[in-house]
């Protein structure tokens, strides 16, 4: 990968939709089945 390709990839990454940029940080939970302990664990890991 040359400098121009690297620069273009970085630009694409920065301009990607918010959902695409946040995907690695999101965790799917069930509003019905998740307990308080699950929610606390997820919040703690996010910090």
Image (spheres, rainbow, N blue to C red):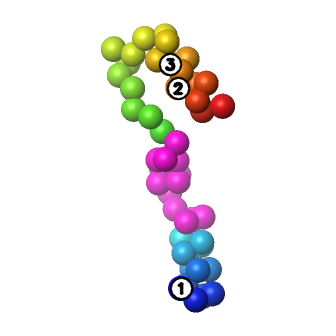
Q: Residues within 10 Å of mark 3 (few under 14, many from 20)?
A: few
Q: Nearer the viewer, mark 3 or mark 1?
A: 1
**Circle 2/circle 3 CB separation < 8 Å:** yes
Q: Residues within 10 Å of mark 1 (few under 14, many from 20)?
A: few
For label 2, the residue is: 42
- Disc 1 from disc 2: Cα separation: 37 Å
Q: Which comes before the other along the chain, label 3 or label 1? A: 1
Residue 21 falls within the magenta-colored stretch: yes
Please, is residue 41 above or below residue 28 in the view?
above
- At x 54%, y 75%, the residue is 9
Percent x, y of residue 33: 33, 14
The span shown in magenta is 13-25
- At x 50%, y 18%, the residue is 39
- Disc 2 from disc 3: Cα separation: 5 Å
For label 1, the residue is: 1
For label 3, the residue is: 39
């Amino acid at each position: 990968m040359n400098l121009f390709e690297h620069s273009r990839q970085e630009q694409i990454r920065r301009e990607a939709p918010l959902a695409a940029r946040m995907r690695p940080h999101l965790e799917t939970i069930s509003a019905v089945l998740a307990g308080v302990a699950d929610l606390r664990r997820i919040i703690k890991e996010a910090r």
